[in-house]
Image: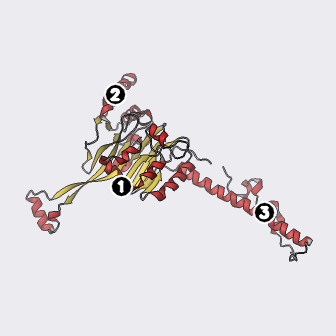
Amino acid sequence: MLTSLSNPRLLPSHILPFDQRHPVLHRSPSITAYDGSGSRDGDRFRALSLKRSGFLSVIDRAMEEEEEYRKARAEVQRKGVDVEGYSIEGISVGGHETCVMVPSLNVAFDIGRCPSKAVHQDFLFITHAHLDHIGGLPMYLATRGLYNLKPPTVFVPPCIKEDVVNLLEIHRRMSQVELKLDLVALGPGETYEIRNNLVARPFRTHHVIPSQGYVIYSVRNKLKKQYAHLKGPQIKKLKLSGVEITDIVLSPEVAFTGDTNSDFILEPRNADALRAKILITEATFLDDENDIEHAREHGHLHLLEIMEHAQWFRNKAILLTHFSSRYKIEDIRQAVSKLQPKLSPKVVALTEGFRSAY
């Protein structure tokens, strides 16, 4: 940690203020103009100037380092991000845990190790059965029971529902706890109404085991085109007579991929995920040490693939998650800065749980 420059008593010795180590710098010496003849006064003047510039450069570097430290500390302490009117919180560290929450929608995507705030989300969407994404499920259910919260609705890919049922039965027998929930097997092509103005639909993703993402849609009624020219009283009269005057319009708000390789981008049926207001997707690998082939082999995305397919993203914002734990916050920030000019959507990184180089 770099010591604060605001308190001279705390400064390291190599950047003490000038008057504590070199009082001569604060005097007003009588300086004779250097005449180029190699006079002693000229040599002293040049030496003094060089020494002064050297100390200034040390302090400039120290101030730059402290500014970097402040940025890194703020990044480490930051909880969640605000994008396109939504506050999104959570933690997503590749291979360790993933749980991303959108509190205003009352939803959590994957449960990771069950972070405390996730307990208060009534709808939980599980993308696949790897433990860093589903491992906290029993704890999520047990804690909600402890707090006397209503049983949550938990969505899972249909192919793992039976295994989830068996898993929870084991935990019930071991812990003698009820673990209440409404377990819903929901697959691509199906729709679930979360509330009267919000629905969810899964979409296909490509991981090393069965997986799926989810799109959350807002629902609104829009006046049919053939009635757009009518005035208020006329529209009201039609409505009272039983005529259906509106169409139901679904607008994709938030899409979450979970773990996947880049093939999901090219799936025609995944168009809504790529035009959702916010796309939350992974970028496990960022550098050349683990290339695209390595990422695909393990069912993940490489940052270069997001650049490669930039033209397909019509989202307003992209939230990158699931970075490998080998990266520091500064690595992630640098990678995002390179990616942003290639994409029209705003790109943000979820970095909670990652360490800083500082």
The answer to whether mark 1 and mark 2 are in CB contact below 8 A is no
Q: Position of residue 245 (x, y in %)?
A: 14, 59
Where does residue 77 sit, x and y in percent of width and height?
A: 54, 49
Helix, strand, or loop for circle 2?
helix
Query: Residue 163 — which label?
Result: 2
Compare marks 1 and 2 and give the one earlier in the sequence: 2
Q: Position of residue 341 (x, y in %)?
A: 48, 59
Circle 1 residue = 277
Q: Is 170 located above or below residue 147 in the figure?
A: above
Query: In the visual, does 44 lie left or right of 349?
Result: right
State whether residue 152 appears in this view.
no
Q: Mark 2 or 3, which is nearer the eye?
A: 2
Q: Is residue 3 placed above or below 113 in the rendered structure?
A: below
Image coords of residue 320 (percent x, y):
45, 49
| Residue at horizontal 44 percent and vertical 50 percent from the top | 306
Q: Amino acid at mark 2?
A: Asp
| Residue position marked by numbered label 3 in the rendering | 18
